[in-house]
Amino acid sequence: MKPNHIISKKSLIFLIIVLIFALLIFMVWEDAFHDEIKKMVGFLLTIFFVLMMFSIKIMRHNPLLFIFLGSFFTFLIGAIFIGAIEGYDLLYSYEHSIKLAVIRCLVLSILGILTGALICVIKNNVQTKKIRNDKNISYDFSILRSIALIMFYITIIPRFLQTIDIAINVVEESYISYYSTYTSSIPYIIIKVGELNLLALLLMFAVDCEKRKMVIPIILSIIVSSISLLGGQRNVFVLDILLLVYCLFYANNRARNRLEKRWLNNRHAIVGIIIFPFLLYLLFYIGYWRNGISVEIGIIDAIKSFFTIQGGQVDFIAKSIVYKNIIWEQNVPYTFYSFYDYLSQNIVSRIIFDIDKIGLYTAEYALKGNSLSATLYYIISPSSFLSGRGMGGNYIAELFIDFGEIGVYIGNVIIGIILVRIGDLKNKPWWITVILMIFIRWIIYIPRSSFFSWVVYGFSLTNIFFIIGVFIIYKIILNYKQKKYNWEMV
């Protein structure tokens, strides 16, 4: 059987040569140009561009790597890129050695992601894959589609109410108060029901709902996600939109493979390109509005400022390197913070093992919570941290603190492999598809979060109970239909 190549052999050979060349240059670069930060930055931007070209090559089959790199650019590369164009040094306040260490970490990260992605693509290209049986054949999708649609429309109202409640709180109080003192006026059970809405939408994609039945749910989801901007929650809006983009690619690929009418065409691409700069301007404006600051600025300057401000995660890596010898060890390495927090702070563990809940913006959390973000900000500015402020996080900084530069490279090889592997949802069981889509939503965010946060979000108790609940409802309906059919046959 002919291998199912997702990238041509010529393109693959070219990228491998570029990767080898980049690795050789990187090994001698610091010795050859030790004082040339600009040349290091140029090298960084060059290999990032190579990785972007690679992601575009495989985008038709798997857009996840491209979407992830968009996040990587926003939080880590964009500010450096703008600085290179404008002629300023983003890390001007740091010593030369710290600057070099930060750039090395970013270079190793990009090379690691490219290496991991190439490993998966080469494996796919040189092996003749067996045809994977569709694991969903044994399911009655008409039942699952009905469950998904009904659950979506039931849960959209609670999700809407909770989003409005957060927005009202931010408008009447402040954005900081949401993280420090906010208590929802919506009953807890209503909030939990609203959390199922996104899962119901993903279930609709997973069970192949018809395009005409998906239009209204997609529009409603975009509206609710947009309302979250009134609460200053840019990350919620962006992650929802990026996940929706991935799901639309997924549905489009499935339709193309079946020779059906596609979900996306060139017109959609043109509309997306036109809207994109205005979305960046909106996100820039929301960043000031939520802090009560009025600003008037042109769209070009706003976009440049947006990437410069979001580039604070570069500063997070720099501060992690500066304070590395001060940052204290915790129960587990910071890289595994998400696992530790999930296992020790979920409601089941706290009840069974009688573990006290640790508040997020408390000294105890900074000292014992295993969060590098909390620990670092507590060291830098204890009063600001205790008042509810933060500085985000970054998986590269975690890897560096725990395992050094070799850990940064190996960790990103793993990320590159994961991005290509979980982005391929063909012939997966519907329930695995839903979980992988949740993984996808959160792995996009790790340039500003923790290394394993995406795993924890995927296996949250809410998601697990949702899957179990759908299984139970499905079995009840299926048994009823079978009994009814048998009765009618008598």
Image: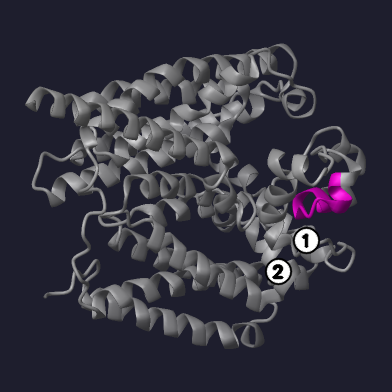
- Secondary element at image label 1: helix
Magenta stretch encompasses residue 308 = no
Q: Position of residue 85 (x, y in %)?
A: 54, 55
Q: Is residue 146 left or right of residue 441?
A: left
Name the quadrant containing residue 347.
Answer: top right
Quadrant holding the C terminus: top left
Q: Is residue 130 left or right of residue 53?
A: left
Magenta stretch: give its range.
365-376
In the figure, 409 relative to 203: above or below? below
Q: Position of residue 11 (x, y in %)?
A: 26, 74
Q: Is residue 20 left or right of residue 191?
A: left
Q: Position of residue 399 (x, y in %)?
A: 67, 67
Magenta stretch encompasses residue 366 = yes
Name the quadrant containing residue 97.
Answer: bottom right
Q: Is residue 167 visible?
A: yes
What's the mark number on residue 140?
none
Residue at horizontal 64 percent and vertical 59 percent from the top:
395
CB contact under 8 Å: marks 2 and 1: yes
What's the mark number on residue 400?
2
Q: Is residue 393 visible?
A: no
Residue at horizontal 24 percent and vertical 33 percent from the top:
209
| Crowd rating for badge 2 (residues with CA inside 10 Å; few <14, some 14–19, many 20+) | many
What's the mark number on residue 320?
1
